[in-house]
Amino acid sequence: MPVKETTVEIKLKNLKNNLEYLKSKITSKTKFMAVVKAFSYGSDSRVVSQELERLGVNYLAVAYTQEGIDLRKFGIKIPILVLHPQEKDFDEIIENQLEPSVYSFRVLSFFIKALKKKNKTSYPYHIKFNTGLNRLGFLKKDVHKLSGIIKPNLPKYIFSHLGASEDLNEKKYTKKQIEEFISIDKALEIKLGTPMKKHLLNTSGILNYTDYQFDMVRSGIGLYGFGNDIEFESSLKPVLSLKTIISQVHEIKAGESVGYNKGFTAKTDSVIATLPIGHADGIGRQYGNGKGEVLIEDRMAKIVGNVCMDMLMVDITDIKCKEGDEVIFFDDKSYSAEEFSKKANTISYELISSISRRIKRVVSK
C-alpha cells in the first residue's frame, strides 16, 4: 500500500527469513546471538527483539547499557550482552540482569567492585580479547594476570571480533585472528583448569568461516538483510524500507537555483520535486548535489542541491509524476539500502542505523 508520509516499514517475515538462513549455516547445537544495538540498526529494537525472542534466538546483544535496560523494561527475558559498558554502569547491569563484556583491567575492577557492593560472589559476564582489530579487548599477554583475578568468578563466555571476515582477499588476516583466538583460549584454559565457552563469528564469519562457530555465533547486519557479498543477496532479504512522498513540484527556468547556497543551478528548464525528509532524518548531506538517487515511478531521480535538515529536492524533469506520489529511498525489492548508500560512498550499516526515530514506523508480518 502506498505511503502518505515519510515511513519506515519493518518486515518481520524478512527478519525470520534471514534468521533461518543464517541458522542453516550452523549446527543445531550452536547458539545464536542477535545484535539489536542502535535501535536494531535503525528499525525498532523493541519490536525486533520481541520477534527474535519469539523465534527462539538464545541471546541478544546491545552496545550500551541503556539499550539493554530499555529491552528489560519492555519485557524481554532472554540473556542480553552489553558490548561496551562504562564504569558507572555495573550497578544497573546487575539490577537488570544484563551480561557485561569485560574488555580491560580497568573495566574488570569496576565490575568486581559492583559485585562486592551487591554481595555477589558470581555473576554471568563475557571477556573480550583483542585478536587484531585493535579496538577493545585484553591481549594474550594479559592471560596470566587476568586468570588470577577471574578464577573465583569465571566468565560465561570469552569472545573476540573479526575485522575483515567479509573480505575474502583478507583471508590471511582473518585466519591469523582465528588462530590468535584459539591460542588465547588454550592458554586461558590451562591457567584456569577448565574449558571455556566462546563466540567469535559475526555475520560474514558465519557465511565464510563456518568451521569456527564454537559455542555461539553473533549476527547483526545479516539479520537485517545484508551479507556484505553479492553471493548472499538472493538469500538475505532487507527488513527495512524507507519511503516518502512528493510534497511539492516546481518548474524552474535555466539559470535558476535550488536550495541553500544555490547548491544546484539548472542548465536547462527543469522540474524539481521537494521531499519531506532531510539530514535530520538520516539522509546526510553527502547524498546531495547529484550523488544520491531515489526511485519514482520506477525511474531514478537525482538529489539536487544541498540536503536540508527536513527536506531535499530531486530532479523529476523526465519522470511523469505528481505531488503526493510515492518515493522510494530503499526497499526489499526494487532498490536496496546497499545500492542507495554506495552512491555516496558509504555503507548500508551507516545509512539504516542513522534513520531518525521521528520517522513513522509501520510493522508488517
Image: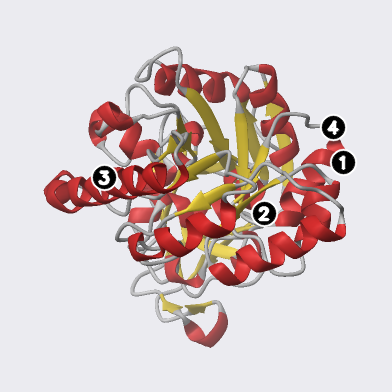
Distance in Å between CA atoms under marks 2 and 1: 38 Å
In this rendering, is residue 41 above or below 60? below
Q: How is the image coloured?
A: secondary structure
Which residue appears farthest toward the top when viewing the image?
28
Q: Could you tell me which residue is drawn at 82 percent across and 39 percent down?
A: 72
Front residue of 349/326: it is 349
Label 4 vs 2, first from the N-terminus: 4
Marks 1 and 4: CB-CB under 8 Å?
yes
Residue type indicated by callout 1: Lys
Q: Is residue 359 left or right of residue 75?
A: left
Q: Is residue 51 left or right of residue 150?
A: right
- Residue 3: x %, y % from top left: 67, 36
Distance in Å between CA atoms under marks 4 and 2: 39 Å
Distance in Å between CA atoms under marks 4 and 3: 36 Å
Q: Which residue is mark 1?
A: 73
- Residue 9: x %, y % from top left: 64, 34
Which label lies toward us, 3 or 1?
A: 3
* Classed neighbour count for the residue bearing mark 1: other residues with Cα under 10 Å, few (<14), some (14–19), many (≥20): few
Q: Which residue is mark 4?
A: 75
Label 3 vs 1, first from the N-terminus: 1
Marks 4 and 3: CB-CB under 8 Å?
no
Q: Which residue is mark 2?
A: 247
Q: Is residue 161 left or right of residue 9?
A: left
Q: Which secondary structure lies at badge 1?
A: helix
Residue type indicated by callout 4: Gly
Q: Which residue is mark 3?
A: 178
Distance in Å between CA atoms under marks 3 and 2: 52 Å
Which label lies toward us, 2 or 1?
A: 1
Front residue of 104/339: it is 104
